């Protein structure tokens, strides 16, 4: 794994490790294509649509208006075209428009997690299968994972509009069609059931779980974002002809299923852990983002109760935002070795 290891181990999880502590201002993963500053001029040259959202402030610096969801969407389209060759990408209004650099970091750190058990080499190719729980209308994780490592993806989604939108994106981009399949989850209480078929194997699962515990909490969170923007955190400034000084890490939009569930993030992940135990032999690594570090102790307790054999907590940071994901596996040493020999070694 990239970064230093911390010896502090969560006592409630068997054979668990914490991969350092992300600090505010920490850089992205070394393989992340979004290092440094957005070059708005370069992006606008590639995607002229973005030009309409770039203005000049009184100091002569170019700015991108992050109050405007359309500007965020245009930026994402430009980034996906410039760095991943995705020529056709769009989402409906009021659906989650994620910050791509942070999403890409999750993919790259998961790749390191696989490499950790493969002599430091990231397994690549379509035989490596990933399951994205809650693929969303944006389909970001399958885009990044398939384009960066050639992995194949199954995207699971509860919302039919989101699923249909993701299907349009996949269908419209030839590089995605052979590698990305989509499946609808018919039951809001199920996570892996109805999605992972009997005997089907996945090398990893990933998830950006609903963050809030209620619609009221979600609305309050959106208001806090707007308040931050009004305090000047929305500005992306660049000197004429140069790259932006900073990048915001903000989501715009989001449907109920994307933003909240009963019990919030902690309850969702604990339910995921319980259901993963029933499929423990069909996946090498399960994982989920954990936005609130206060949720970690309860998650570790659930993992211990479920009998997880290995647990990894990987810290990530983008600018001022600090996050992490927890990954767990039920496979013993002999089963892991057989898995690698059968699926990862060419």
Image (cartoon, rainbow, N blue to C red):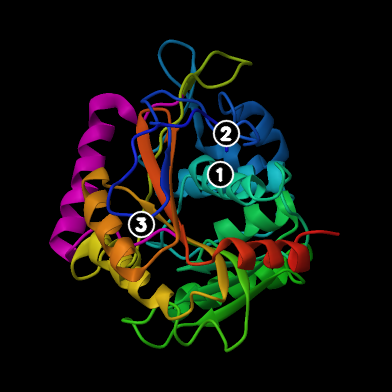
Q: Main secondary structure of the magenta part?
A: helix
Magenta stretch in the rendered image = 207-236
The answer to whether the residue labelled 2 contacts the one labelled 3, judged by CB atoms less than 8 Å apart, is no
**How far, Cα to Cα, is label 2 from label 3?**
32 Å
Upstream in the sequence, badge 2 or badge 3?
2
Crowding at mark 1 (Cα within 10 Å: few <14, some 14-19, many 20+): many
Task: Indicate yes or no whether the magenta region holds residue 215.
Answer: yes
* Quadrant of image for the N terminus: top right
Instruction: Reply above or below: 168 against 20.
Output: below
Upstream in the sequence, badge 1 or badge 3?
1
Instruction: Reply above or below: 234 against 123.
Output: above
Q: Which residue is mark 2?
A: 2
Secondary structure under the numbered disc 1 in the rendered image:
helix
**How far, Cα to Cα, is label 1 from label 2?**
8 Å
Crowding at mark 2 (Cα within 10 Å: few <14, some 14-19, many 20+): some
Q: Residue furthest top?
A: 59
The spot of residue 209 in percent (x, y) is 36, 61
Dot in front, 2 or 3? 2
Q: Which residue is mark 1?
A: 109
Task: Judge from the rendering whether residue 49 lies leftward or rightward of residue 188; answer left or right.
Answer: right
Marking on residue 253: 3
Kindly tell me whether residue 126 is visible in this rendering: no
């Amino acid at each position: 794994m990239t970064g230093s290891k911390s010896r502090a181990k969560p006592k409630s999880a068997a054979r668990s490790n914490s991969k350092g502590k992300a600090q505010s201002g920490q850089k992205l993963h070394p393989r992340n294509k979004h290092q440094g500053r957005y070059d708005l001029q370069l992006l606008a040259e590639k995607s002229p649509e973005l030009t309409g959202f770039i203005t000049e402030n009184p100091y002569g610096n170019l700015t991108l208006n992050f109050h405007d969801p359309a500007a965020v969407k245009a930026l994402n389209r430009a980034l996906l075209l410039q760095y991943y060759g995705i020529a056709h990408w769009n989402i409906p209004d009021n659906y989650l428009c994620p910050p791509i650099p942070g999403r890409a970091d999750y993919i790259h750190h998961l790749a390191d997690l696989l490499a950790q058990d493969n002599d430091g080499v990231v397994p690549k190719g379509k035989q490596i299968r990933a399951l994205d729980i809650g693929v969303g209308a944006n389909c970001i994780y399958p885009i990044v994972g398939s384009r960066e490592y050639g992995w194949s993806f199954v995207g699971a989604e509860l919302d039919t509009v989101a699923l249909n939108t993701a299907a349009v994106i996949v269908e419209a981009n030839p590089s995605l069609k052979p590698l990305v399949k989509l499946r609808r989850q018919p039951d809001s209480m199920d996570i892996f059931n109805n999605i992972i078929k009997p005997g089907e194997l996945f090398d990893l699962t990933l998830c950006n779980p609903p963050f809030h515990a209620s619609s009221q909490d979600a609305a309050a969170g959106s208001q806090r974002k707007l308040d931050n923007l009004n305090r000047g955190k929305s500005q992306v400034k660049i000197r004429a002809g140069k790259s932006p000084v900073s990048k915001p890490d903000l989501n715009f939009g989001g449907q109920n299923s994307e933003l909240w569930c009963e019990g919030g993030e902690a309850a969702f992940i604990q339910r995921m852990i319980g259901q993963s135990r029933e499929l423990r032999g069909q996946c090498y690594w399960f994982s989920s983002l954990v936005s609130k570090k206060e949720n970690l102790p309860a998650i570790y307790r659930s993992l211990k109760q479920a009998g997880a054999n290995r647990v990894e907590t990987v810290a990530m940071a983008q600018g001022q935002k600090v996050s992490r994901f927890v990954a767990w596996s039920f496979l013993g040493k002999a089963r892991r070795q057989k898995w690698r020999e059968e699926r990862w070694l060419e």
